[in-house]
Amino acid sequence: MRRGAPELVVGLLLAVLLSSYVVYTRRVVRDLRAEAQRSSLMYARVLRAQTDTSAEFEHADWTPPSDIYETESGYVIAMDLPGINREGVEIDLDENRLVVKGTRSVEQPTHRSERPRGKFLRTFSIPGSVDHGAIGAEYKDGVLNIRLPKRREQKAQKITVKVS
């Protein structure tokens, strides 16, 4: 059976419409993914702003990755801060919050920039079991290690009652 010109034109139009629909659908899906990522980042910023108890919320351009470990004697926060001078890092303790902030600046002109720059800020909740007076930090090889030692538990003491 041989197709005529009208059937061939209709077939070509359907093929063009189908390929255009596929391209359009891919573009819509890509745009939806991008919008979902933007919404997710915005939601995370709003949550951080709502959980921040300070009156003044500081803006951060980037967030350094961190790991938190628990040992028998305390906690350790390991934060990647390569290329940042030790003087550029500030650590504050405010009741049960530990705030780490600073700035990474690149003064050389770059052809391509993949590392984050600008202000960074991380806030951590400190458990009540941490001895605030013994908190310490060490910055070595681009990693900031913050030691949060646990308080020593007071052992129960036996009290003798005198009978008179």
Image: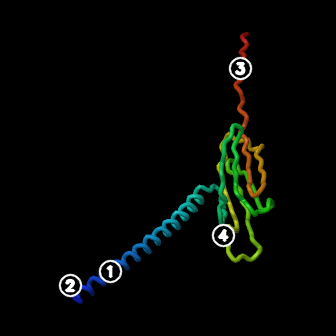
The answer to the question of whether label 1 and label 4 lie on touching residues, with beta carbons closer than 8 A, is no
Disc 4 residue type (three-letter): Glu
Q: Mark 1 sits on what residue?
A: 15
Disc 3 residue type (three-letter): Lys
| Mark found first going from the N terminus, 4 or 3 | 4
Which residue is drawn at the image coordinates 23% and 88% (left, top)?
6
Q: Mark 1, residues whose alpha carbon is within 10 Å: few (<14), some, or many (≥20)? A: few
Q: What kind of element bears circle 2?
A: loop
Which residue is drawn at the image coordinates 68% and 67% (left, top)?
115
C-alpha gap between disc 3 and disc 1: 89 Å
Relative to 125, residue 18 above or below: below
In which image quadrant can residue 114 be found? bottom right
C-alpha gap between disc 3 and disc 2: 105 Å
C-alpha gap between disc 4 and disc 3: 62 Å
C-alpha gap between disc 1 and disc 2: 19 Å
> Which one is nearer the viewer's eye here, 121 or 142?
142
Q: Which mark is residue 2?
A: 2
C-alpha gap between disc 1 and disc 4: 42 Å
